[in-house]
Image (spheres, rainbow, N blue to C red):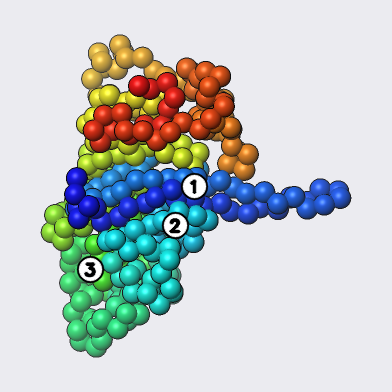
Amino acid sequence: MSTASVLLKVENLTKYFPVSRRSLFKRQDEFVHAVDGVTFDVRRGETLGLVGESGCGKSTTGRVILQLYRPTSGAVYFDGVDLVKLPSKELRMMRRKMQMIFQDPYASLNTRLTVGEIIADPLLVYNVAQGAELEEKVRYLLELVRLDPMYANRYPHEFSGGQRQRIGVARSLALNPELIICDEPISALDVSIQAQIVNLLEDLQGKFNLTYLFIAHDLSMVRHLCDRVVVMYLGVLVELADRDELYKHPLHPYTQALLSAVPIPDPFVEEKRQRVILKGEVPSPVNPPSGCRFRTRCPIAQPLCAESRPEWREIQPGHFVACHLVS
């Protein structure tokens, strides 16, 4: 793969959140290890899926990439430019090329603004359009996400969840971005509406050559939408591969457990396949296990797994895994 085909490259990205606990005699400073040494890239025009359990650090990773949270350490290269080192003014201009679709369509829209004002806001902030040109742009964006332009004067509470998410998509497209981070954009929607939003995202990607980082925990939807998939557990990456390769030949025990929980429509196949049931609870990110983060729940863990953190290795071309026991 040529370097020119990579739009986003994340290297050893780390984000710790400080927490303080007061004991009888002193205050103890601790840290939530939300994202811990994450490395991956996203190619132009592709959809990379980022999956894992709730609380594993997926959304934090997306926000750190956009510099909504400044990282503790590491680098985020967008089109060859390290966003971490950019001054505020230059970072603000770079953000025109990167947008986010948030998880909750009920919380991500300003209830005091009309839909037209919400969509127009980024255009005004960056002085892209004003007056009649601004109104025309808003109408175009509403049509683009298959909403009636007459809705521009309505408020968010007058819309359903699916319609609100379409408004969020329209807002994300206002500045003609190259990269859109989709932070579980369908998890708060009814199943019947989820497919409509996914189909809309696919159509927009084909029309504008968009690049998506699609954060989700619905593995069946990820398989439908994504080109490659990266699996995250407790702040670290455990596996990355092309979609078909990952679903057919998962190598990491955690990936195998996740995929074994995905229902299969064929009752005969479903009856014969073996489920991987994980024991115990996800450890606290404040005090994660030594060595491999997954070892406390892993069915094949060995003493080595507690001694050192597994290396992020390319086992096969394009197939990366972090596990001592995979060769």
User: Whole-percent x and y of residue 271?
Assistant: 31, 13
Say which quadrant the N terminus sits in. Answer: top left
Viewer-proximal residue, 102 or 175? Answer: 175
Front position among marks 2 and 3: 2
Q: Is residue 257 visible?
A: no
Which residue is painted at 20% across and 76% down in the image?
137
Q: Is residue 41 visible?
A: yes
Q: Residue furthest left?
A: 207
Cα gap from disc 2 to disc 3, whole angstroms: 21 Å
User: Whole-percent x and y of residue 124?
Assistant: 32, 81
Q: Residues within 10 Å of mark 2 (few under 14, many from 20)?
A: many
- Determine whether the residue tagged by mark 1 lies in a helix, strand or loop: strand
Which residue type carries mark 3? Asn
Which residue type carries mark 2? Val
Q: Residue furthest bottom?
A: 131
CB of mark 2 within 8 Å of CB of mark 1? yes
- Determine whether the residue tagged by mark 2 lies in a helix, strand or loop: helix
Q: Which residue is mark 3?
A: 176
Viewer-proximal residue, 164 or 246? Answer: 246
Which residue is painted at 16% across and 61% down in the image?
208
Residue 64 has which mark?
2
Q: Which residue is mark 1?
A: 35
Cα gap from disc 3 to disc 1, whole angstroms: 29 Å
- Determine whether the residue tagged by mark 3 lies in a helix, strand or loop: loop
Residue 259 falls in which quadrant of the image? top left
Q: Residues within 10 Å of mark 1 (few under 14, many from 20)?
A: many
CB of mark 3 within 8 Å of CB of mark 1? no
Q: Is residue 311 left or right of residue 175?
A: right
Q: Which sits earlier in the primary sequence, circle 2 or circle 3? A: 2
